[in-house]
């Protein structure tokens, strides 16, 4: 049997599983417990996207954190279990995602993704692009746009050029390194509102969890002339 543990201050994140009618919920002083998950539910995207949780497996009244061999604690006694639909209100209070405060802070990180998407952007060195673009046919460049970032060329559009570099896919309004996604998918809308409220920029994420803000107005069509003018 699986159990989920989360602090009461993070109750708002449970809205994504409230519709699972089979779940039971119980409250301690500062902790919320949920049980009766199926194996499919406990491994679902809805659960993986909830921050601050711990998942346990119950064995002989001992709680083993999921994936670990040693018990973490005993199951608290005297818990009063209630159907989750009854215990959680339909409209939960809005959580204040205060990334810059002292408390309620969440580190934004990238993780490996199981999705497979076509690459939409390519970051290449100057010399790599120069050796190709001088003899490239015009039709090969016309669908593409580009901008210089830290003395490298970010090429945007498809089909991408056959060059060595770092590829990115376009996901949820962000350029992500190919094969990566944000760890806390539930926070994507909040990040978009904070980093790009007027949708006038592209946000490019790096594998080290840093990001670059790229004004869309500075992105230009890729051509031999625009390349020469930029690096002349």
Image: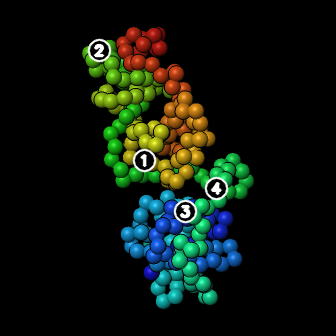
Examine the image and state in which quarter residue 72 appears.
bottom right
> What colouring style does the render use?
rainbow
Q: Of label 4 and label 2, which has the lower sequence position? A: 4
- Please say if 162 is above or below 108: above
Q: Of label 3 and label 4, which has the lower sequence position? A: 3
What's the distance in space between the residues labelled 2 and 1, CA to CA? 32 Å
Label 4 sits on residue:
94
Of marks 2 and 3, the one in the foreground: 3
Label 2 sits on residue:
138
The answer to whether mark 3 and mark 4 are in CB contact below 8 A is no
Of marks 4 and 1, the one in the foreground: 4
Look at the numbered disc 3 and give the secondary structure of its residue. Answer: helix
Q: Of label 2 and label 3, which has the lower sequence position? A: 3
Look at the numbered disc 4 and give the secondary structure of its residue. Answer: loop
Residue 171, x across and y down, in percent: 43, 42
Of marks 1 and 3, the one in the foreground: 3
What's the distance in space between the residues labelled 2 and 3, CA to CA? 52 Å
Look at the numbered disc 1 and give the secondary structure of its residue. Answer: strand
Of marks 4 and 2, the one in the foreground: 4
Which residue appears at 62% of the width and 88% of the height?
A: 78
- Please say if 222 is above or below 201: above
What's the distance in space between the residues labelled 3 and 4, CA to CA? 11 Å
Label 3 sits on residue:
15
Q: Of label 4 and label 1, which has the lower sequence position? A: 4
Q: Of label 2 and label 1, which has the lower sequence position? A: 2
Label 1 sits on residue:
180
Q: Can you name the residue that lies furthest to the right here?
A: 102
Examine the image and state in which quarter residue 194 appears.
top right
């Amino acid at each position: 049997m699986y159990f989920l543990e989360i602090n009461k201050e993070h109750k708002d994140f449970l809205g994504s599983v409230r519709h699972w009618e089979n779940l039971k919920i119980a409250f301690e002083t500062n902790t919320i417990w949920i049980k009766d998950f199926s194996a499919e539910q406990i491994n679902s995207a809805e659960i993986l996207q909830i921050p601050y949780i711990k998942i346990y497996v119950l064995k002989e009244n001992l709680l083993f954190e999921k994936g670990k061999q040693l018990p973490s604690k005993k199951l608290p006694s005297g818990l009063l279990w209630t159907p989750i639909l009854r215990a959680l209100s339909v409209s939960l209070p809005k959580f204040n995602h205060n990334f810059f405060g002292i408390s309620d802070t969440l580190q934004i990180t990238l993780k490996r993704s199981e999705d497979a998407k076509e690459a939409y952007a390519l970051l290449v060195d100057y010399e790599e692009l120069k050796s190709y673009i001088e003899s490239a046919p015009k039709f090969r460049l016309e669908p593409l746009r580009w901008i210089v970032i830290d003395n490298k060329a970010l090429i945007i559009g498809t089909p991408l050029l056959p060059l060595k570099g770092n590829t990115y896919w376009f996901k949820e309004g962000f350029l992500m390194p190919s094969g990566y996604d944000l760890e806390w998918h539930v926070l994507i809308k909040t990040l978009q509102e904070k980093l790009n409220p007027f949708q006038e920029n592209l946000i490019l994420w790096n594998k080290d969890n840093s990001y670059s803000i790229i004004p869309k107005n500075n992105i230009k069509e890729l051509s031999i002339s625009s390349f020469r003018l930029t690096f002349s």
